[in-house]
Each structure stands twice: as C-alpha cells, then as structure tokens.
Image: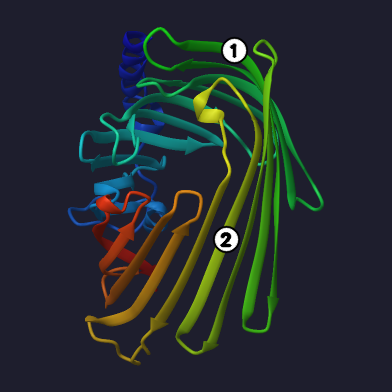
C-alpha cells in the first residue's frame, strides 16, 4: 500500500506541475518587481495564507499562492520530526492536492496524500483520497442539498474506506456518511451572537457498526467602547457508538475560548511602524484538561495588510510535568 501510495504521489506531483492551468500566463494585473504582471486578484489570495513561526505549530508557510492565473498554493513547514511539503489548487469546486501534510507537532512523520475532492455547497459530490502513514484512504460519492433558505446543508455520501492500523491490522469497508449542519447569527446593539450545529452519522454495514455525533457551538463578541473588544466561544461535542476507521471516530469534547483585544487609535497620518493592538487569549479544553494563556503585541506596519507581532504564552496540559512556554508570531486583520 505504501509503495503504491508513493508512486501515485509522484505521478500526481508531475501531473499537477505540467497541467495547462499551472503553465498558463498570469492574467493582467499590477506589475511586480522585475516586470512580472500579477493576476488581478493575487493580493487577495494571501487572506488564507498561514505563516508559521511557533514552537506549537512549526516554522514555515502554508497555502502560499503562486503568481499564476490558476490559484495554486504551496506549503513548506518544519515540524520537530518531519517536513510538510505539498501543492494544492481548487478549480470549479474541485480540490487537487499532493504532497506530505501536517500530522501534528508530536508525530514522527507527516501524512503523504494524493487527493481529488469535488465538494460544492450543493450538488454532486465525489472524493478520492489516497494516504499513507496509517491515515485512512477513501473513495466516496454522494449529493448535497440545502433547506431553510440555504441556512441548513444536508450531505449524503457512500464510499469505501481503507484504514491501515499498524502490524497486520487493516480495515477495508464500505460505509455511508450523513451530515446535517447550519448556523444562525443575530446582533443586539453592540453585541453579536452566533449559533451553529452539525450532526453526523456513519454506518459500516459489513462490520455492523455505526456512530452518531453532534457538535453545538455558540459565540459572541461585544465592543463596549471604541477599540475594546471582548469575544468568546464554546464547543460541545456528543458522540455515541464506534466505527472501525480510527479517523472517523468522534468522541466527547468540550472547548472554550475567550479573548480581549484593544486596538490603539490610528493617527490620520499613521507612521510606517507603530504599536497597533494588544490582545489576551485564553483556551480551555475541558475534556483534555488543557489550559493555555497567551499575550500578543501587534504592530501596524504600513506595508503589511495585517497587524503582526510576538505572542508569548504558557500551557498547562493534563500532564503538568510537560507544561511549557509558547512562543510564536500572531496576526490580526487591520
């Protein structure tokens, strides 16, 4: 399985690199240094780019956009025990991805993956994901539709999963997947609130196993005075039953987040570099008995579209002997 996955990953990388969309000339846009003309929407693509500089999530960059007409993203990041390196693009509601992907900071190796997934908000769905390093592979097809004015989405898939669980343990099984999700938000003056829920059901007929799970999330933020914002969110997950594929097994989970942000007033003619905001964040994962507190200093740099600065924090995991300082860069939209 692993050698076959490696061959397909290499073939996928070559196919993606040589695809006509990847080689197409960039659309007319603002000129870049050296005379290269960038696509008209190139700068907006950076809104989903992740810059990593932390002893929590590694060092590098994820989803960096290439200056091509087709929005192709590259990722390169160093985790303690492995490298992430991958290429991905999305065209007409279809994701194409190949490379080695994040497997968590404590893992000994990343997840090699070759994937083609077509998942529009409504309509026909299909996915082929081939993975290694004990991550599950799948081949699925289905359909999604919406109700209540597109506020609720219903997804139904059928497929086959392959899960190598180490040693001589492996699972090859057909399964069904049903998900229903939606959300609602409302404002009360300066207070903004939101509520969301997702219900899932997986069945594995051959193994005669099934699992159901429900996520309930609430959030709120308020700005009592100009520049000062309080925000909080909470997630509750309930699950019953088990299925034979580890990656599809959900469990009871609770997490709360709280933050306070103060944005300094912006001068009519701001300097090229100045302090823009200060922020405090608290994360509590109740089921894991984990707490983290972070403090951020965020600077306003004229040439950057976001506020950026150092973040210093401390975490208390279940094993208090492994508590540690958290050092990273943090970001905030201007």
Which quadrant of the rendered structure holds the N terminus? top left
List x then y, in percent, for residue 140. 61, 21
Query: Looking at the image, which residue is at 26% across and 62% down?
Result: 329
List x then y, in percent, for residue 314. 29, 63
Neighbor class of circle 2 (other Cα within 10 Å; few <14, some 14-19, many 20+) is: some
The relative height of residue 139 versus residue 74 in the rendered view (above or below) is above
Q: Is residue 154 visible?
A: yes
Query: Looking at the image, which residue is at 19% across and 57% down?
Result: 33
Which label sits on residue 148? none
Of 193 and 332, nearer the camera is 193
Which quadrant of the rendered structure holds the C terminus? bottom left
Position of 313 with respect to 224 (left or right) is left
List x then y, in percent, for residue 41. 43, 55
Of 43 and 227, nearer the camera is 227
Which label sits on residue 173? 1
- Secondary element at tag 1: strand
Q: Which residue is mark 2?
A: 234
Q: Quadrant of residue 274?
A: bottom left
- Secondary element at tag 2: strand
């Amino acid at each position: 399985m692993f050698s076959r996955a490696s061959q397909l990953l290499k073939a996928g990388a070559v196919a993606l690199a040589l695809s006509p969309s990847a080689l197409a000339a960039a659309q007319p846009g603002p000129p870049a240094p050296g005379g290269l003309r960038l696509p008209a929407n190139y700068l907006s693509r950076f809104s989903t780019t992740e810059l990593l500089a932390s002893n929590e999530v590694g060092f590098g960059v994820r989803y960096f956009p290439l200056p091509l007409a087709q929005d192709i993203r590259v990722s390169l990041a160093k985790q303690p025990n492995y490298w992430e390196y991958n290429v991905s693009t999305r065209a007409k509601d279809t994701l194409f991805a190949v490379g080695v992907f994040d497997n968590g900071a404590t893992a000994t190796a990343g997840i090699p993956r070759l994937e083609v997934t077509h998942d529009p908000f409504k309509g026909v769905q299909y996915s082929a994901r081939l993975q290694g390093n004990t991550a599950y592979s799948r081949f699925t097809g289905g359909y999604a539709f919406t109700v209540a004015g597109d506020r609720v989405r219903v997804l139904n898939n059928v497929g086959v999963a392959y899960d190598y669980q180490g040693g001589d343990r492996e699972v090859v099984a057909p399964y069904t997947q049903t998900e229903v999700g939606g959300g609602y938000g409302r404002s009360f003056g300066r207070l903004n609130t939101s509520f969301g829920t997702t219900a899932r059901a997986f069945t594995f007929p051959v193994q005669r196993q099934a699992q159901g799970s429900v996520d309930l999330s609430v959030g709120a933020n308020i700005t009592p005075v100009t520049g000062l914002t309080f925000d909080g969110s909470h997630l509750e997950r309930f699950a019953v039953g088990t299925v034979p594929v580890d990656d599809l097994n959900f469990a009871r989970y609770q997490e709360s987040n709280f933050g306070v942000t103060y944005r300094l007033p912006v001068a009519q003619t701001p300097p090229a570099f100045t302090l823009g905001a200060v922020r405090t964040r608290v994360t509590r994962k109740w089921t894991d008995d984990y707490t983290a507190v972070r403090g951020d200093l965020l600077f306003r740099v004229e040439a950057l579209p976001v506020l950026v600065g150092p973040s210093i924090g401390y975490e208390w995991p279940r094993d208090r002997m492994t508590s540690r300082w958290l050092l990273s860069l943090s970001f905030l939209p201007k």
